[in-house]
Amino acid sequence: MGLSAYLVLSDELTNEIFCEFCTKNNGVFIAESDSYSFSEEKGNVWVSVLGDEEPVSGEEIEQYSRLLCAPPRTQILFEVGWESKSEAMYLELALKMMTAWNGILCDLNENFLTKADVEIRLKAIG
């Protein structure tokens, strides 16, 4: 696997809703890692919901709450492969999620991106 990015949502996603989203978007469930794999010829992304056991500081919660205009309820981890199309793939998946739910993306460089920022980034990398 490669680099990591996080999508923080103000919506609480159940496993059923997450599963439905991933399978609808051609994700393949990987039981060993409790994640979904998205693969194309030159791209790979693995996506999973982080549980409550993942530590989040009070400062992070405050920052996410401010950016989301609501408390954070779900964290989604993107493990982005090194292949040439992997970055575009993860951004496309994040954008689809941000269209369905209120979210803020902490990208591969730890920058916070809104839905509009993700759209601009996708256009830039073509």
Image (cartoon, rainbow, N blue to C red):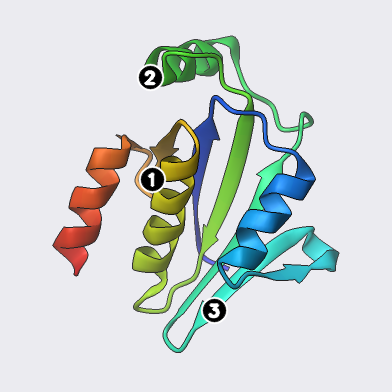
- Quadrant occupied by the C terminus: bottom left
- Quadrant occupied by the N terminus: bottom right
Q: Are marks 3 and 2 in contact (CB under 8 Å)?
A: no
Q: Residue at x 32, y 40 (%)?
A: 115
- Residue, disc 2: 67
Q: Residue at x 58, y 10 (%)?
A: 58
Task: Please state which amino acid type lies under the numbered disc 3.
Answer: Ser
Q: Residue at x 24, y 50 (%)?
A: 119
Task: Please state which amino acid type lies under the numbered disc 1.
Answer: Asp
Lateral position of residue 121 relative to residue 7, left or right: left
Marks 1 and 3, Cα distance to the nearest angstrom?
A: 19 Å
Where is residue 108 shown, x and y percent of the image?
39, 50
Where is residue 17 shown, x and y percent of the image?
70, 46
Q: Nearer the viewer, mark 1 or mark 3?
A: 3
Pick the front one: 53 or 116: 116
Q: Who comes first in sequence, dot 1 or dot 2?
A: 2
- Residue 47 visible in the current orientation: no
Q: Are marks 1 and 2 in contact (CB under 8 Å)?
A: no
Task: Please state which amino acid type lies under the numbered disc 2.
Answer: Leu
Q: Residue at x 63, y 23 (%)?
A: 56
Check disc 3 and report its element: helix, strand or loop. Answer: strand
Q: Residues within 10 Å of mark 3 (few under 14, many from 20)?
A: some
- Residue, disc 1: 107
Check disc 2 and report its element: helix, strand or loop. Answer: helix
- Residue, disc 3: 39
Q: Who comes first in sequence, dot 3 or dot 2?
A: 3
Instruction: Indicate whether 93 appears above or below 9.
Output: below
Residue 73: name its quadrant. top right
Lateral position of residue 67 relative to residue 126, left or right: right
Instruction: Indicate whether 22 appears above or below 103.
Output: below
